[in-house]
Image (cartoon, helix red, strand yellow):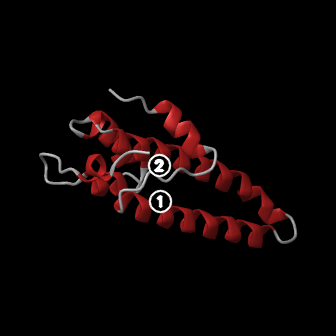
Amino acid sequence: MADQTSATSTASSGLTMNTAAAISYVTIIPAIVFLLIAPYDKNPFVRFHSVQSILLGFFAFGAQTLLLYTHFIPMGFLISMILSAIFFILWVLVVVKAMTGEWFKLPILGSIAMSLVKKP
């Protein structure tokens, strides 16, 4: 989708765009910060990963909140543990993909993130 040079360029702070994109997945706080401060707010690669991180965080929080009620049904705890493992695997995957400079889109969330990120 985008060339590697735009994803790996170094910002004035010393962080590469790949590193900034990967850091945006730590929590939604760095993702929001990268959407607000220059030069990251101008880089489509960092913006995409920041928005996707925020969407993934809200989706995971919502799913885990709903699953609190599954503990009252048989196998509910197992379902919750499996979903937690899936979210952890997804998180590791997106961090690694961002670190390598890849525009990795999660199903549904990635498309929404891509549509929200407009090149400045």
Q: Observer-nearest residue: 20 or 97?
A: 97
Residue for point 13% across, 49% down? 13
- Label 2 packing within 10 angstroms: few (<14), some (14-19), many (20+): many
Residue 86: quadrant of the picture: bottom right
Image quadrant in which the N terminus is located: top left
Q: Residue 45 in the image: state x and y as whole percent.
A: 36, 44
Residue at the top extreme of this rendering: 120
Residue 10 appears left or right of 25: left
Residue 68: quadrant of the picture: bottom right
Determine whether label 1 and label 2 are within 8 Å by CB: yes
Q: Where 81 sits versus 110, above or below?
A: below
Q: Amino acid at mark 2?
A: Ser
The residue labelled by disc 1 is: 94
Residue 64: quadrant of the picture: bottom right
Q: CA distance from mark 1 to mark 2?
A: 9 Å
The residue labelled by disc 2 is: 53
The kind of secondary structure element at disc 1 is helix
Residue for point 35% across, 52% down? 21
The kind of secondary structure element at disc 2 is helix
- Label 1 packing within 10 angstroms: few (<14), some (14-19), many (20+): many
Q: Amino acid at mark 1?
A: Val
Residue 39 appears left or right of 75: left
Residue for point 34% across, 37% down? 35
Q: Observer-nearest residue: 11 or 103?
A: 103
Residue 55 appears left or right of 4: right
Residue for point 28% across, 46% down? 6
Residue 37 appears left or right of 23: left
Q: Where 21 sits versus 84, above or below?
A: above
Q: Residue 104 in the image: state x and y as whole percent.
A: 49, 53
Q: Tell me which label, 1 or 2, sits earlier in the chain.
A: 2
